Image (cartoon, helix red, strand yellow):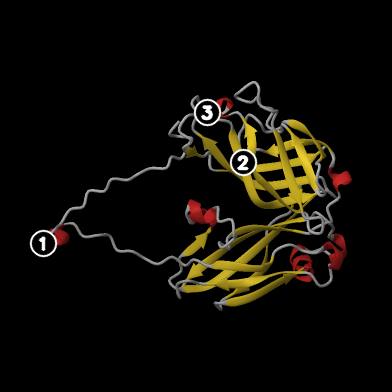
């Protein structure tokens, strides 16, 4: 239980009073500022209806003035095949306004703009180097920053060429390519039209049975912006906690403020927050953020 669920803990801190002599005997280790770079995006999604002018734009900032340089690499994924990573942008100035358009991406990847299409994914990874030569990359930043939903960390992020969302196009049979848990990956499920415009309903994607037999079957509704393919998942029941952990908890709920549903390629890409209510007390626990990714068959 404790290895899976993160609890809301109350820390009892014993405060001791030490003399200067004691502090000299037990000195604190010296700290060193990291060469961390943040990004504030103005636009992260490339517009399929205006490929010649659309661009990924934002502002790079170095909170501490010890960053000498920043290098951004990109790999393109299309048809499930990921290319090699290549450098697409570098700077030694902070703050720095940056713009990466499809000419930049095609030049770095050895392609033509005409080679790109709706639903293409671009995976970015970056490193920054401090003035004394230390290198920072995604694996070296803490977990909270790695999961930053606002993409304030600039070391690993993803962009797409958007495509207009069509409910009719989105319907069909899908396979979980990454569900955040090993035993549900590969599950197949149906997607049907929701009752409201631009909504779809995923029929029990986790292939789970509700904890209380009388409860409604698990169905997950996704609301999608028809112009961009950006979607959201309101907090809702998703699977039985008992099938993934232990007794004493209600069904696990998931929620995602934003993600992508590209009906043109049949691709669902979200990172979902999990909420696990404790039976009787209502205390909330979590499995953490979990992938929620599927592909139309």
Closer to the chain start, of discs 3 and 1, is 1
Query: Which picture quadrant has residue 274?
Result: top right
Q: Which residue is mark 3?
A: 245
Q: Position of residue 101 (x, y in %)?
A: 75, 70
Helix, strand or loop status at disc 2: strand
Instruction: Give the residue at x 48% y 56%.
Output: 140
Q: Residues within 10 Å of mark 2 (few under 14, many from 20)?
A: many
Instruction: Give the residue at x 70% y 64%.
Output: 44
Q: Nearer the viewer, residue 254 or 42?
A: 254
Query: Which picture quadrant has residue 2?
Result: top left
Q: From the viewer's perspective, is residue 12 above or below residue 68?
A: above
The reply, left or right, for residue 161 in relation to residue 156 is right
Q: Nearer the viewer, residue 227 or 108?
A: 227
Q: CA distance from mark 3 to mark 1?
A: 50 Å
Labels in figure, total: 3
Mark 1 or mark 2, whichever is nearer to me: 2
The reply, left or right, for residue 144 in relation to residue 205 is left
Q: Which residue is mark 2?
A: 254
Q: Position of residue 242 (x, y in %)?
A: 55, 25
Q: CA distance from mark 2 to mark 3?
A: 16 Å
Q: From the viewer's perspective, is residue 79 above or below residue 62?
A: above
Q: Position of residue 183 (x, y in %)?
A: 63, 29
Query: Which picture quadrant has residue 43?
Result: bottom right
Q: Which mark is residue 21?
A: 1
Q: From the viewer's perspective, is residue 201 above or below residue 51?
A: above
Mark 3 or mark 1, whichever is nearer to me: 3
């Amino acid at each position: 239980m404790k290895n899976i669920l993160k609890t809301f803990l109350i820390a009892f801190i014993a405060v001791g009073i030490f003399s200067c002599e004691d502090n000299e005997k037990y000195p604190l280790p010296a700290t060193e500022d990291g060469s961390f770079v943040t990004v504030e995006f103005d636009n992260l999604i490339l517009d399929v209806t205006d490929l010649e002018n659309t661009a990924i734009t934002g502002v790079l900032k170095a909170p501490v003035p010890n960053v000498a340089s920043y290098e951004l690499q990109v790999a393109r994924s299309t048809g499930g095949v990921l290319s090699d990573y290549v450098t697409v942008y570098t700077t030694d100035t902070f703050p720095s306004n940056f713009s990466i358009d499809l000419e930049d991406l095609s030049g770095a990847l050895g392609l033509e703009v005409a080679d790109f299409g709706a639903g293409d994914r671009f995976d970015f990874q970056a490193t920054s180097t401090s003035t004394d030569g230390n290198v920072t990359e995604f694996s070296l930043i803490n977990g909270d920053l790695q999961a930053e939903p606002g993409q304030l960390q600039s070391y690993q992020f993803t962009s797409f060429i958007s495509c207009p969302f069509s409910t009719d196009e989105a319907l069909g049979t899908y396979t979980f390519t990454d569900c955040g848990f090993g035993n549900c990956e590969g599950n197949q499920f149906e997607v049907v039209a929701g009752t409201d415009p631009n909504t779809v309903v995923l029929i029990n994607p986790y292939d789970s049975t509700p904890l209380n037999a009388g409860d409604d079957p698990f169905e997950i509704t996704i609301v999608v912006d028809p112009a961009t393919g950006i979607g959201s998942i309101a907090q809702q029941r998703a699977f039985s906690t008992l099938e993934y952990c232990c007794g004493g908890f209600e069904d696990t709920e998931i929620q995602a403020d934003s993600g992508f549903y590209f009906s043109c390629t049949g691709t669902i890409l979200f990172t979902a927050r999990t909420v696990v209510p404790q039976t009787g007390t209502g205390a909330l626990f979590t499995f953490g953020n979990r992938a929620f990714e599927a592909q139309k068959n």
